[in-house]
Structure formats: C-alpha cells, structure tokens
C-alpha cells in the first residue's frame, strides 16, 4: 500500500520544471508511504510514489519502468493484487520474465501484455497510473469496489492526480475553493460524497471500476465492470456453499504478506469470521493469530442497550479469544484523546468526516501499527449481504431516498439563511438518489420487492460503503497501516447481487445466508449475535466535551463556519435532547456537533475559500 501522484503537462517538458513542487507532493504522501519514495520525470510526465513496504521489499520499488520497443513504460501503483501468482504464471507462458515476486512488477507486465485489458484480469484493491513514453499517453485505473482512492484535476492546463486531496492542493495554481455544490455536499450529504465528487471546486475522483487514457486530445474514461442482474438458479444449500468458498478464498488470499499481519476483532459476525479463517490458515503454517479490539474509557459503566446496539462487545471478544486461542490486544481510547483526534482525522481525510467514528479508528490504527503493518477488517459485509436495518424494513426499502440520511430538511435547517433561500434541499438530495437508483441493474428481475432490494444494494455499494471505505483507507494509511477488506472482493459482490432477498435474509435474520455459510466456524453465541454497529463511546463526558468546544466556537465572531452555518441553529443543537440522526445510527447529536467542529477546523486549516455563486448550481438545485 502506498501513495501515488503526478502531473502531465503537454505544454512543457520536465526539464523546464523545478523539483520543489514535486518534493512537496512527495512529502505530503509520506504518511501513506513511510518506507521509500521515488520520482520519475521524463518528457511531459512526472510520476511520484511513496511506499509502505509489504510485498517483496527489495524488488517492489516504484516508480517502476519497463522497456517496450525501446521506449519506457512507467508505473505508479497504490494497492494490492490478490491473484498475483495466477497472472504471473499466465505472463510467463507468454514469455515474460520477472526479477522479483512483487505484484507491482506483475501489474506492469500485465499492462505490457494486454494494455487497458489488464484491469479485467485483476483481483485486488488498486489505483494506478502508467505513462507510455512512445504514445505520450497516461493510463489510469481504479479497483472495482473503490477501496483505493484516485483524485484528479485540471490545473493551469496540467493534469494533476494523487491518492489524496492534500497532494493535489499543493499545486502552485491550485485553489482550495468550494462553490455552492461543495457547500451542499458538506451540509446535505456529508460525510458522504456524490460519486466522483472531490468537494473542492474542480477536483474529481475517478469512479470505482473505471479506467481511461489521458492524451493530447483530452481525458477519456469508461467503466470496465459493474454488478449486473442475473437469474439465480442455485438452491439455498448450493448458494451457501458458494458463499463459503468465496469468502474463505478472499480471506486466505489477503493473508499474503512479508510483514506482520493481524485482524481487527469486535466480536461481531464479520470480524469474527475473518479472524476464524485467518487463525486456521496461520495454524497450518505453525503461527498464531494476532487480533486487536477497540474499547473506550468507562464504556462498560455507561453503556445503555438500544435498538441498534443491544449489547456491548466485551463478552463476545472474550469468547472469540478463547475459541481461536489468539493473541488479543485491547486498545482503550480516552475521552480527551478522542476529542483531540477529531482534528487530526480531518487532516487524514482532507474533509470533515464521521466525527469520533473517524477519530477513534485513527487512534486505533496508530496503536496497531506499533506491532503490525497489515490488518484485515470486516467492512462491507453489511452492504453486500444486506445487514443494515434499512434492508429489512419494507417501508424504508420502498421509499425514495437514502436510508442513512432521510433528513434533508433537518440538515438544511443548519444552512445560513442566505444560502438556504437559494436551494431546495429535498430536490438536491432527491435528484442524487434518483440518478443513483436509476443506475441499478434490475433488467432480469420481475418482483417489485426484489427490484427494491437490488436498488438498495446498489445505492449502498456506491454511496454508504464508499464513505466507510474512505474512512478505513484514510485513517489507516495516515498511520502507515495497510487495512485489507476481504468482503470487498468483487467476486463476492458479483455473486451476491443476484441472490434473491429471501435467501440473503434466511430465516428472517440479518445476513442469515452468511451465518449459515459460516455455521461451523464460530461459537453459537457469536454466530447468531444481533448486528452491532462499529463501537463508539457511550461516555457522557464526550458529549459534554464536544458541546463545550462548540460553545467556545459560538463565541468566535469571525469563524468561517458561520459563513455557511446558522449560529442560532448550532446553539439550539447544543441544547437538544433529541438524538436526531445525521448519518445513519452512528452519527446522532454528539457526532453532529463534532462534525461541525471538524468543518470549522477544515475551513481554517485548508484555508478554504467560499464562492457560493448561484451560477454554480444545476437547475434542479434552485427553488
């Protein structure tokens, strides 16, 4: 795992450019890639790479160059391939030779063999760019599920790209600006983002499962994969067996590493299943699994069961520790540290994020990194297998709107009055939903209920899951930790999209199919444990602390937050006794307050200029 960046300038050659800007770009990437860095400058291209060494530490250095017909072809790549050996064998049969065992060399030679067709053969998480000195073209690509980021912008006539927004903003002519659309992304959709939107004006993100060429004629991008509707003819038993095989294979593939590896263990179904398969695999090699679990100061004292979180994790983690005989490490996060980390989490994400949900993961990853470099985590099972409450609520499933943020008017009430007058919040969010829902493939599905279930799966894959993947990538990589997500294997998503809802919801139980597939891998208590969300603090001291911080902010007459947000509404928020959701069950009033604290910090730290011109609004965004 690494960071990439670069610039293509067809108007000037690299010989005329100063190193200082590129060095600054590399410095901004050092947290993602603390082990090595490199730069390739030739002709009109500059390619940059910062490396976190995981596989073939000596021979995986980047940028990596190969010759074809006497011309250089150079790769910068962030990610991991999980079918490296299969591709290597295929390339060897074609006559290609290898100097090491890195997936970087395999990817580069796969491009030499198949050019843009190489992406269809890759199983992994990746974002990469390849410069062809002969054709003067740049090929770019991003993995199918969107695990690894790829941002780009046109700045001063140059094409600039990077793994993170902060790197692009270092361009001498870049401006950290938000227009009206960016404001509405933050206030009406945040911490989610419209697919492809970088929030900052003029910055875009390459969509998942997309690739393309940059040439003197411009940028051409196309999708190379999508989840497609199909007729499911497998019986329940065959479906469960296939799910078992796919999940076990994905986990085992992702245990390959030349550095210490571990799993994140919450005691829930997903992390426990990954840990169980990993423990068995490591036992075959005579090794013992290391796991990490997150806790919060005084959480057991203040925990209150709720509809979404009926019990705490402690007992289930202990059960899994005994069951696996693993080396479990408990990381306890203090309240004061959690509040302070809100602002470092902004620097990791380059945007306001999921408040303490981000901050806690950042602190958690930092502690894990002291002992391991690679971790496996259970994200994305809920989106793929239908684990969230909204999948199982027929009323929500039939409604038009994002189930995790059905509060456009509530959110809009925080907009500064001058901005609020010029927008229709429900139309803005509603159009985003309609466009996304229309992209769901239901071409072979007749049942209304089944069509609704597939639309729900589609919007979760391309919206909610992307927010969680952003969080996981930025918080872990900021700490120099690579976190892999086996449930994001595209083969699992492909197969499960076509599985009918009654099979996924076997016996009326959330992720019932996955539970049946894993029935002999977990203790009964864990196997049938009701879904709990990512653990967060229940300590009232946290709520008190963020309220105090916001009250201090409300006393600041010139804070840029109040160029966007109503001061009056924030005062009312600090006095609220209703736990109104902001973004799913993980973000209610304490996290909403923290989100606004993050937004204030972000506006100042990134020196964001606000240019809310009405001309920036598409027609549907106006009243």
Image (cartoon, rainbow, N blue to C red):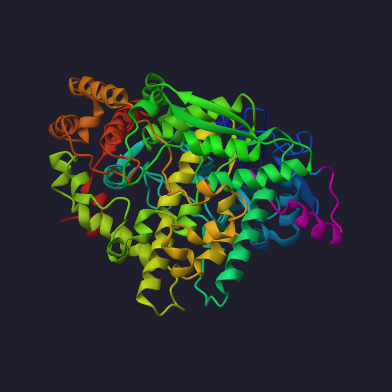
Q: Residue at x 51, y 26 (%)?
A: 331
Q: Is residue 566 left or right of residue 447?
A: left
Front residue of 121/490: it is 490
> Depth check: 367 or 96 in front?
367
Q: Can you say whether 186 is above or below 601 in the image?
A: below
Report the label total.
0
Q: Is residue 92 magenta?
A: yes
Q: Position of residue 133 (x, y in %)?
A: 69, 49
Residue at 17 percent of width and 20 percent of height? 555
What stretch of residues is rendered in magenta? 78-100
- Residue 569 x %, y %: 15, 35
Q: Would you say 505 lies left or right of 117 here?
A: left
Q: Position of residue 315 (x, y in %)?
A: 49, 36
Indicate whether residue 604 is drawn in magenta.
no
Q: Residue furthest front?
A: 524
The residue lying at 53 percent from left, 58 percent from top is 514
Instruction: Check the picture and name the quadrant holding the C terminus.
Output: bottom left
Does any portion of residue 623 appear in the rendered image?
Answer: yes
Left or right of 351 in this view: 70: right
Q: Which is nearer the eye, 226 or 223?
A: 226
Query: Residue 288's quadrant in the figure?
Result: top right
Residue 108's place in the image compared with 386, above or below, is above
Question: Residue 27 is drawn in which quadrant?
Answer: top right
Q: Is residue 156 visible?
A: no
Q: Position of residue 460 (x, y in %)?
A: 41, 56
* Quadrant of the rendering where the N terminus is positioned: top right
């Amino acid at each position: 795992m690494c960071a990439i960046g670069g610039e293509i300038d067809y108007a000037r050659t690299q010989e005329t450019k100063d190193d200082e800007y590129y060095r600054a770009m590399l410095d901004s990437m050092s947290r993602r890639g603390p082990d090595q860095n490199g730069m390739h400058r030739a002709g009109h291209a500059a390619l940059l790479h910062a490396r976190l060494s995981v596989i073939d530490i000596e021979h995986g250095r980047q940028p990596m160059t190969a010759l074809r017909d006497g011309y250089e072809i150079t790769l910068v790549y962030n990610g991991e391939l999980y079918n490296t050996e299969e591709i290597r064998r295929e390339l060897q049969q074609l006559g290609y030779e290898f100097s090491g065992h890195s997936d970087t060399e395999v990817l580069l030679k796969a491009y030499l063999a198949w050019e843009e067709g190489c992406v269809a053969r890759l199983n992994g998480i990746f974002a990469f760019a390849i410069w062809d000195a002969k054709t003067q073209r740049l090929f770019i690509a991003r993995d199918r599920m969107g695990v690894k980021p790829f941002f780009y912008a046109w700045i001063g006539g140059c094409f600039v790209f990077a793994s993170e927004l902060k790197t692009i903003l270092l361009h001498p002519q870049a401006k950290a600006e938000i227009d009206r659309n960016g404001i509405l992304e933050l206030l009406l959709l945040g911490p989610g983002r419209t697919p492809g939107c970088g929030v900052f004006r003029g910055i875009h993100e390459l969509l998942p499962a997309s690739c393309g060429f940059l040439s003197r004629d411009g940028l051409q991008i196309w999708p190379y994969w999508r989840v497609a509707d199909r007729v499911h003819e497998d019986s329940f038993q065959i479906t469960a067996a296939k799910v078992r095989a796919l999940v076990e294979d994905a986990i085992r593939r992702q245990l390959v590493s030349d550095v210490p590896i571990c799993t994140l263990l919450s005691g829930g179904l997903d992390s426990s299943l990954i840990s169980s398969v990993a423990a068995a695999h490591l036992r075959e090699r005579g090794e013992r699994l290391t796991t990490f679990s997150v806790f919060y100061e005084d959480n057991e004292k203040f925990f209150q069961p709720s509809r979404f979180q009926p019990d705490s994790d402690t007992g289930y983690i202990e059960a899994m520790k005994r069951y696996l005989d693993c080396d479990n490490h408990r990381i306890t996060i203090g309240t004061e540290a959690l509040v302070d980390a809100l602002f470092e989490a902004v620097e990791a994400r380059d945007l306001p994020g999921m408040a303490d949900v981000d901050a806690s993961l950042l602190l958690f990853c930092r502690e894990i990194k002291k002992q391991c470099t690679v971790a496996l985590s259970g994200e994305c099972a809920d989106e793929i297998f239908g684990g969230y409450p909204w999948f199982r609520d027929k009323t929500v499933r039939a409604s038009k709107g994002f189930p995790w943020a059905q509060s456009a008017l509530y959110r809009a009430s925080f907009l500064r009055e001058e901005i609020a007058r010029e927008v229709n919040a429900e139309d803005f969010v509603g159009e985003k939903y309609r466009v996304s829902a229309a992209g769901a493939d239901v071409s072979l599905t007749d049942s209304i209920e089944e069509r609704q279930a597939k639309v729900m799966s589609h919007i979760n894959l391309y919206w909610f899951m992307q927010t969680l993947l952003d969080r996981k990538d930025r918080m872990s990589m900021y700490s120099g930790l690579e976190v892999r997500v086996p449930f994001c294997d595209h083969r699992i998503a492909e197969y499960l999209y076509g599985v009918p809802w009654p099979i996924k919801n076997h016996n009326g139980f959330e992720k019932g199919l996955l539970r049946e597939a894993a029935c002999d891998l977990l203790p009964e208590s864990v196997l049938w444990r009701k879904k709990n969300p990512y653990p967060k603090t229940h300590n009232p001291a946290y709520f008190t602390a963020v309220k105090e911080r916001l009250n201090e902010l409300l006393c600041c007459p010139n804070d840029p937050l109040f160029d966007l947000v109503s001061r009056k509404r924030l005062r009312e928020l600090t006095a609220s006794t209703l736990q109104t959701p902001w973004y799913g069950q993980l973000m209610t009033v304490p996290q909403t307050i923290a989100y606004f604290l993050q937004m204030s910090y972000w506006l100042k730290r990134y020196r964001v200029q606000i240019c809310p011109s009405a001309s920036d609004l598409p027609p549907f965004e106006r009243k």
